[in-house]
Amino acid sequence: MNTAVKVALRVRPLTLQEQISNCSECISYVPNEPQIGIVGSDKSFTFDYVFDEERNQRHVYEECAKELVERFIEGFNVTILAYGQTGSGKTYSMGTGLQYQGNPDPAIVPRAAHAIFQLLDAQMEKDPSMEYQVYVSFLELYNEELIDLLQTQPRVRKDNIQVREDGFGGISWQGVKEQQVTSAQELLDWLQKGSLCRTTAATDMNQTSSRSHAIFSVILKQQRSEDPEPTPEGEEDDAVPVVTPKTPHEKPLKKLASKFHFVDLAGSERLKRTRAVGDRAKEGISINSGLLALGNVISALGDESRKSSHVPYRDSKLTRLLQDSLGGNSATLMLACVSGADADVSETISTLVYANRARNIRNRVVINQDFRDSTNSEIAQLRAEINRLKMENSSFRAMGSGPATELDQRRAAEEMRSLRGEVTRLRDRLKESSSELCDVLAERDTLLVEREVTGDADIEAHPIMMTYHHTVMQLKDRLIAAEDQALELQTLLSQKPSSVFGRRPNGPSRQKAPSPFKRRVEPMTDDDHDADGEHEDQRRKDSSPPRGRTAKRKSRQSSRAVSRFDF
């Protein structure tokens, strides 16, 4: 299903240094609405959640993060992304910093860790067959280099870490250590160990500024039972089920693998304000470069005018790591942290613009069910069923029965009906032609009598009459051929239906049955030859062309008689 990226805005209170500098609030709130405005400007922004300076960590977690933990247990990928300028409270809200461990008001990560194991224990009570394993990993992107913060050997921290894309478009990290944990406290202990290795330094804007992007991931692999899908109405009882329980009381199992990414981005900063030099300046340039690539990705995905443009995921390792979280398979929450001081109004507006644009990003979220470890017995059962059906089909074809032969019989019956219709049509046309031919012969005899009376001997046969006689002979021949073909097809069908389409038995050839329409030819005698000669002379005399006024009248009568025929 497609879900939009949710955006929560959190405004931190003014620091002591800002109060000393007489900074004032630059953000105004709309009561009971998740909308804010910029003081002294007509700009306003609307988000899914808005937390002002008086809202504590518990409100932030329960309103926007608790729901994501439940979806993570259901098998969905989840991402919480903290974005904002340096010193705006991102690490404080996420709880990934070492200085925030043991805080009486825990942040998102400690609360989520305890909630994950509580929900898993509750699921175990409902489903005794459920099994699960929880793993954690901690990555740092420092100066465009990936570092594994859970590796105990510093030499291998930067080696063999690669970002890969699987066949389904998902992103995976190879070479990253995944440490298994069994409790929430053990999970937080590994988070603390990784935070000790994270790069931090002091600047003029933040005494404990994060100099790298950090991604703390929780991987859940679980196996739970599921109710079999109900059989649709009207489906036959002998249908082969895809999943069959081994015993009547055992339910089929499904395997889920989901990930929960807690992303703590380094804050954007301006060198003239942080006054960073040397390595701090290089770190700031690298941080801004990664955030710029992230902003381009957000613009390409969230800007309506650039929907069809290319999404530059490969411009930075940061955007490559977050490819699933932005536009991929993940339920994502973007926590935009800003400062309410008027001295930071330009950075605040920039953060608000990108956060508002991120609300237009739509992710394709699906449950991550693992089908690779499905039972081999089900696959073997389906393959055996396919082989059995193939063998039955082959035997039916060989025996001349079954679905294939029934199809041949239907085709033969259709061809038989077509031939019978052709024979009937030819019979009707031949009958009509014979009737018309009798009329013409009668008129011809009348003309012959008139010729004998008038004494005109030069009467020729009309060309239309000759063509008509030729057509009648062709119709007789076609009728005879159609009857022979129908008789042959009926004989083949009486033997075996499948032999009609290519498998004829190698037997002796069958003689054609005589047709009642075929004239019997007998040998001619000498007397017949003499009679034939006399008839030929008489025909020549009859064929002589007519002359005079009487001949023209007879020609017109013959034309009128022939015009009634349909050739």
Image: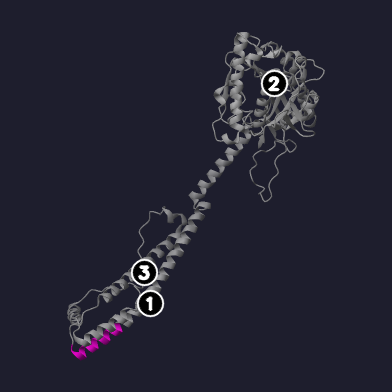
Q: Quadrant of residue 321?
A: top right
Which kind of residue does numbered mark 1 sit on?
Answer: Glu
Residue 81 among those drawn in magenta:
no
Which kind of residue does numbered mark 3 sit on?
Answer: Leu
Which residue is located at x 31 percent, y 81 percent? 560
Q: CA distance from mark 1 to mark 3?
A: 14 Å
Q: Which residue is tagged 3?
A: 479
| Magenta span | 441-455
Q: Secondary structure at mark 3?
A: helix
Q: Badge 1: few (under 14), some or many (20 or more) residues near its Cα, within 10 Å?
A: few
Q: Secondary structure at mark 1?
A: helix
Q: Which numbered disc flags the more N-terminal residue, 1 or 2?
A: 2
Q: Nearer the viewer, mark 1 or mark 2?
A: 2
Residue 444 among those drawn in magenta:
yes
Q: Quadrant of residue 242?
A: top right
Residue 382, image x, y percentages:
60, 39
Which kind of residue does numbered mark 2 sit on?
Answer: Asp
Q: Badge 2: few (under 14), some or many (20 or more) residues near its Cα, within 10 Å?
A: some
Q: Which residue is tagged 2?
A: 344
Give residue 387's mark.
Answer: none
Number of numbered callouts drawn: 3
Residue 210, image x, y percentages:
68, 15
Can residue 146 be seen here? The reply is no
Q: Tell me the quadrant of the picture where the N terminus can be found.
A: top right
Q: Nearer the viewer, residue 492 or 360?
A: 360
Q: Which numbered disc flags the more N-terminal residue, 2 or 3?
A: 2
